[in-house]
Image (cartoon, coloured by chain):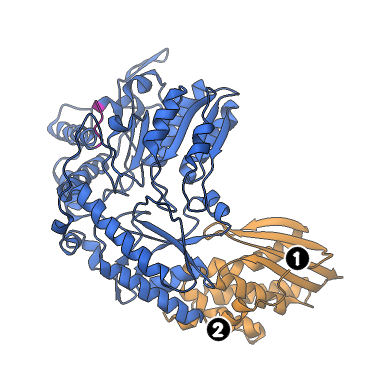
Amino acid sequence: MATPSPARPMKPLASSASFDAERVRRDFPILERSINGRPLVYLDSAASSQRPIAVLRAIETYETHSHANVHRGVHALSQAATEAFEGARERVRQFINARSTREIVFVRGTTEAINLVAQAYGRPRFKPGDEILITGLEHHANIVPWQMLCEQTGCTLKVAPIDSRGELVLDDCLRLLSPRTALVAVAQVSNALGTVLPVKRIVDAAHAVGAVVLVDGAQAIPHSEVDVRGLGCDFYAFSGHKMYGPTGIGVLYGREQLLTAMPPWQGGGDMILTVSFEQTTYNDLPWKFEAGTPNISGAVGLAAAMDYIEGLGIANIAAHEQKLLALATTQLERIPGLKIIGTAAHKAAVVSFTLEGVHPHDLGTILDHEGVAIRTGHHCAMPVMTFFGIPATARASFGCYNTDKDIAALVAALGKAREVFG
Amino acid sequence: MDLKELYRDVILDHNRNPRNFGRVDPADAHADGHNPLCGDRLTVSLRMNGDLIEDVRFDGKGCAISTASASMMTEAVKGKSRNAVADLFGKVHSVLTQQDAAADPALGKLAALTGVREFPARVKCATLCWHTLNAALDRGTATVSTE
């Protein structure tokens, strides 16, 4: 699912035989835990992935040896903290192949990144008659900020439809683009169903009508190489905690030209150059959008997570997860009464399903009793559930540390659910 | 924690064959309940005879705990006064939330919900129908939420 980029040639795929998931598991201390007396089987990485020891150590080392406030003070620790924080920004720039660190804004997560764009890009510009186009697959974080913006500016929200397999109906999506379209906001991977969207095509078509494009990359970046220049998007948002990094840290990538033209979002320290009671001048990019003391250790942890991913090789991780996805799909399809929701041709490591006669919430409790952690509910994508006419699904999602044994445990636990419910 | 404590036979039975499922028509009052955590929705409708609940039914989609709780609730409150319903809900709430609360004999079948207290994430599933019933009794028509 990685998009080949003219700016960065595709690396040759390493043999996935070299990927040793059992060895990878040893990097994640939490996986040694037991739950309800059974070994933890963690199948909820799409909600939040676990952290490898390398990330935990990087945070601990920073906090133990280098912490002070950033961008202030001449003392040694403040300089060390600033170097760590700005070093993490450069790490992020490399990881997503942005042109400049001026384009990398640290935020709390994907949700905050999207809200920042809605309020600092959309709110001053959009007016009645302008349209924002999203898809029927979006997470609430890529719906509600735009609805709020529509209320504030009088612009209109349009939704591109999905089909019964959970695929975006691309023709209909492209048909909804017009000169009225001011912004397109689209997930690269659906969190509820795992569908991979043809984001590059959408970006090109949106640019052809003069719209800017925000890509919600929260579910894509743990599973695929992300090259923002190759993709050509204007904004790209993601969270640290879904890619083996900490919570409370995420990134908004924005093209420099757009970020430069945007007013600040929040005001405060660090985002200013000079302040008087008459007038304040704002800081340069990217600090203009980083009011207040940032999540320094979070940024350090995120950079370590990126090192970790590159150490394993994102192509190796993706190949491993695709094998798990194929195995899980085959095994689950054999269970009588089990229906997989979301059967798109291209999916990331997510299987959403229902089991006839057992509500997803009951499944979640029974699986937890067996040590198997899955997500149940609407996955912050209620319109997707409404489309399929169901209140909720059970969702198993995979990361680099999952193995065939985890899928066997899932299948066995589903058998237990059938046993309880008869 | 034993799953059989949560999913007792009487709960599984009421989940499979919910009693009083549907709508009272005509109804004197109805209310919608919503549990945003799991997306469950249910409607309670009722007809009064003075201070007594003459008929009560529920419909909607929910998990086994929420469906069984609603089903058993409708059986338990039919023919009861508002005060008697409030008293019964108090007893249900106690066994759902207090670890040492003994099941009052007045609970009857509802005592089967005692096991839910071992699963704190599921207590709201069991109380949704009661909050919805109270909303119908209090305000005629309303929507309540567990959040």
> Is residue A203 left or right of A362 when viewed as pictured?
left
Looking at the rendering, the stretch of residues picked out in magenta corresponds to A96-101
Q: Secondary structure at mark 1?
A: strand
The image position of residue A135, as x and y in percent, is 50, 41
Residue at image location 22% in from the left, 47% down from the top = A314
User: Magenta segment: does it hold A97?
Assistant: yes
Of tags 1 and 2, which is closer to the observer? Answer: 1
Supply the letter of whichever chain is blue.
A
Percent coordinates x, y for residue A212 in the rendering: 43, 26
Does B38 appear above or below B53? above
Point out the image quarter for the N terminus of chain A. Answer: top left
- Give the numbered dot on residue B102: 2
Which mark is drawn over residue B135?
none
Query: Front-most of A333 and A308?
Result: A333
Q: Amino acid at mark 2?
A: Ala
Disc 1 and disc 2: Cα gap in Å? 31 Å
Residue A136 in sight here: yes
What amino acid is found at the position of numbered circle 1 in the picture? Ser
Which residue carries the number 1 mark? B45
Front residue (pair A84, A192)? A192
